Amino acid sequence: MGQKTKYEMEQEKKYGPRFTGGDHLNPEDGFKYYLHKTMMANELHNGYGGYLMSNAVKGASGPSFGGIQFDVGSNNDGQKLLEKVLRNAVDSKGNPFLSDTEMKQLHRIYKPFYDVEKNGKITKKGMTDADRQFYNQIKPKLDAALSSPKGMELLNENYKMQLDRKVSKVEEVISNVKNEENRNFLEHSMQAKVFIADIGNQYGGNVNNALKNFLEQTENDRGIKVDHGRLTKVRGGFDMDDLKSFRMNTPYGIKHSEDAKRRDENIERITAPTRQQNNQKSADLNTSSNNPADKIRALIQGFKNDADGTFAAKVLAENSDVVENFRARQQEVVKESNQQQQEVVQNTLQIQEERSYSGRLFG
């Protein structure tokens, strides 16, 4: 590997080693690759921070770690993985990072940082002041264990398995969508697939079950509301704007709108190359198919996915003769219209002059 840049050194100083669990992936791996890139942007600091405990306290979270940011305040798999690391990882002298007494008290951090409330009532107790003090005491040791060679190895292995699970889960969700038009959109939109996976990684059962119901909706349906969030309705044909509205109308999206926007902007940016590929396929179909209906469908889909104007530019270039004919015809129409306007003006002036002449004769 080459020498680290100043940015890389600064990031590592703040957040520990760069997370390497997805370094084996490339764009040819499709969904899994774009999901990994999204996890690095949405859950970590551009790939840094996976081998440390995170103290983010937005929403109802507890301490988090790993490439997908396991929340040990509520995630049993995350709790098991953390304990596995602590049982197997050792320091430079071959000693465990936590003492037996600390291991026995580890359950004290398996809570949100603070009480979780819903409709003015506490639904889940958070850490006490003493629990938070205990967490702050052992956090440097947890960080050291997670960023040790064995800790990194175990987190990387688990991350690969988690990506496989998330890809399979999203594919299952989409395959179960009964609305054929919506399902077709979801199957062919990498941005939508990654969005569904990101929602699954960030939220609990209530939001994800609501999303499954929302994926069936059309503009004729009443819409979906999650807990004390806002109502979300489909506007026109089901597309990414509807999915983004869904996130923004969740309780988290309302309370932390900037973070919700950040996540969706990252997904849109990261999956942009796939839309360019889809536009290319649509353009190829447009030029190769002899079926007028296929051509129209390809054009519509291409323009819907055209976030940066590349598809429109390609269509215009490949149909330059049609465009030139259209422009020539428009110029003729404009010329005819100008001539007609001039004739109207001349006729109007002539009529006014005749009326003026008549008035002088009979006045």
Image (tube, rainbow, N blue to C red):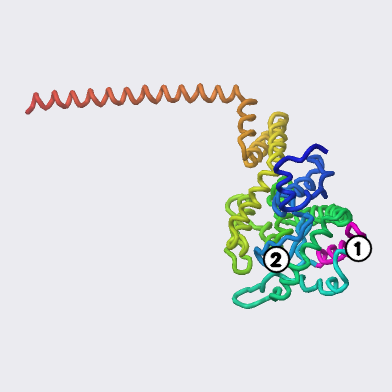
Q: Is residue 213 left or right of residue 52?
A: left
Q: Is residue 186 visible?
A: no
Determine the residue positioned at 70% across, 57% down.
199
Residue 126 percent coordinates (x, y) = 70, 74
Q: Is residue 223 left or right of residue 91?
A: left
Q: Which is more foreground, mark 1 or mark 2?
A: 1
3D distance between C-alphas at marks 1 and 2: 30 Å
Q: Is residue 305 visible?
A: yes
Q: Which tag, 1 or 2, sits closer to the chain's start?
A: 2
Residue segment shown in magenta: 76-93
Q: Which residue is mark 2?
A: 61
Q: Is residue 272 left or right of residue 105?
A: left
Dominant secondary structure (helix, strand or loop) of the stretch shown in magenta? helix
| Residue 245 within the segment the image draws in magenta | no
Determine the residue positioned at 64% across, 74% down.
117
| Residue 85 within the segment the image draws in magenta | yes
Toward the front, the furthest residue is: 93
Above or below, 148 relative to 2: below
Decide: few, some or many residues near mark 1? Use Cα within 10 Å; few <14, some 14-19, many ≥20: few
Determine the residue positioned at 53% across, 25% down.
326
Which is nearer the eye, 5 or 329? 5
Residue 236 percent coordinates (x, y) = 58, 51
